[in-house]
């Protein structure tokens, strides 16, 4: 079964399932992404912060797949929130990826309390979008109060908000806010970096459906309408994580997973995190 796409608020289509490369070592990235492309992934989520954009670009270039068939996302790193730095960082990401354009470029973190207002950063993102070298722009780790400021002080509505979401952090409120404002939610760490896979309720559903716990959790995300890009460097797990479109969870199983919410983050809190490398 093929991966469905979701239409962003500017008409661009994004594959709902992608491959994430956070913590993939730079020297292993080209191989991992090549394997993902062989399996059928057509959406890669990287970031300047991950240090592996060159490997992503190498794999895309060597795949023989048309550029237009692969959706590539990267993100603006925390040290580059000033307008001029943001424009330069975007150029550098394109150069490192060896691409003429990005499909999606995100502000990685809102960074409360630093000496650059993220409104300045978003206005730079608008310039990048207007240059035509990026098909869509969005944000990551933005809370409702950050988004409200963008709505009142800037022009372009973010196409996506990439936030931590998994069964232990279901993010009902923020996801609903995104949806109300035509922003697609992308769920990062969709399996909580593996932490939810031993959960007895998830294991029980997986056994009953003859699926793996990872497939059950990823399918839950898909049915909620979020975009996901699980990370793995093992071909077998990449393959497993790709097989989500030939089964369904019933409403009871969906509710069981959602009911596991305990407000537990695996990553930093966007309202306090302001690390600049
Ligand atoms: P994830 O939830 O995708 O979990 C990845 C880990 O789970 C892997 O290291 C692997 O050991 C294990 N795993 C993967 N598939 C498995 C399977 N089928 N069975 C058993 N174990 C399996 O975690 P992640 O990498 O943090 O998140 C996914 C992607 O989200 C990242 O690669 C990155 O692209 C993005 N991300 C974005 C942000 C952000 O701030 N915007 C933060 C974290 C991650």
Image (cartoon, helix red, strand yellow):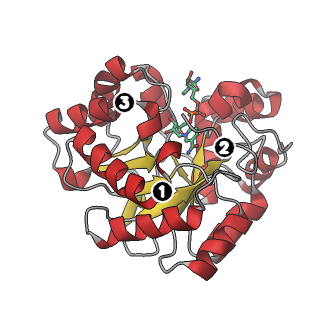
Q: CA gap, disc 1 to disc 2? A: 15 Å
Quick one: 112 or 209, which is closer to the camera? Answer: 112
Residue sitting at x 43%, y 21%: 233
The residue carrying mark 2 is 274
Residue sitting at x 47%, y 36%: 49
Query: Which element is circle 3 on?
Result: loop
Residue 225 got which mark? none
Q: In this view, does 21 lie to the left or right of 148?
A: left
The answer to which image quadrant residue 57 occupies is top left
The residue carrying mark 1 is 82
Image coordinates for residue 66, horizontal then vertical, percent: 16, 49
Task: Give the foreground label among 2 and 3.
Answer: 2
Residue 184 can be seen, yes or no: no
Does the beta carbon of the residue at mark 3 sit less than 8 Å from ligand 1? Answer: no
Residue 52 got which mark? 3
Residue sitting at x 50%, y 25%: 23
Image coordinates for residue 127, horizontal then vertical, percent: 36, 70
Q: Where is 65 relative to 117, above or below?
A: above
Query: Which element is circle 2 on?
Result: loop
* Marked residue nearer the N-terminal end (1 or 2): 1
The answer to which image quadrant residue 95 occupies is top left
Mark 3 neighbour density, 10 Å: few (under 14) some (14–19) many (20 or more): many
Mark 2 neighbour density, 10 Å: few (under 14) some (14–19) many (20 or more): some
Residue 22 can be seen, yes or no: yes
């Amino acid at each position: 079964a093929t991966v469905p796409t979701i239409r962003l608020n500017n008409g661009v289509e994004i594959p709902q399932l992608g491959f994430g490369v956070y913590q993939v070592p730079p020297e292993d990235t080209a191989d991992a992404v090549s394997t993902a492309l062989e399996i059928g992934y057509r959406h890669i989520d990287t970031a300047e912060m991950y240090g592996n954009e060159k490997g992503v670009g190498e794999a895309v270039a060597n795949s023989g797949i048309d550029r237009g068939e692969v959706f590539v996302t990267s993100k603006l790193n925390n040290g580059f929130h000033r307008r001029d730095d943001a424009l330069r960082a975007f150029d550098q990401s394109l150069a490192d990826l060896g691409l003429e354009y990005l499909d999606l470029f995100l502000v990685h973190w809102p960074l409360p309390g630093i000496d650059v207002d993220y409104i300045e950063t978003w206005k730079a993102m608008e310039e990048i979008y207007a240059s035509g070298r990026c098909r869509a722009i969005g944000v990551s780790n933005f809370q409702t109060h950050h988004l409200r400021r963008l709505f009142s002080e800037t022009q372009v509505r973010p196409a996506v908000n990439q936030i931590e979401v998994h069964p232990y952090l279901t993010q009902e409120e923020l996801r609903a806010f995104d949806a109300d404002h035509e922003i697609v939610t992308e769920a990062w760490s969709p399996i909580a970096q593996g932490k939810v896979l031993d959960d007895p309720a998830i294991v029980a559903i997986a056994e009953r459906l003859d699926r793996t716990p990872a497939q059950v959790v990823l399918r839950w995300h898909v049915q909620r309408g979020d975009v996901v890009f699980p990370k793995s460097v093992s071909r077998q797990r990449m393959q497993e994580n790709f097989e989500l479109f030939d089964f369904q969870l019933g409403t009871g199983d969906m509710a069981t997973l959602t009911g596991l919410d305990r407000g537990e983050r695996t990553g930093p809190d966007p309202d306090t995190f302001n690390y600049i490398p």
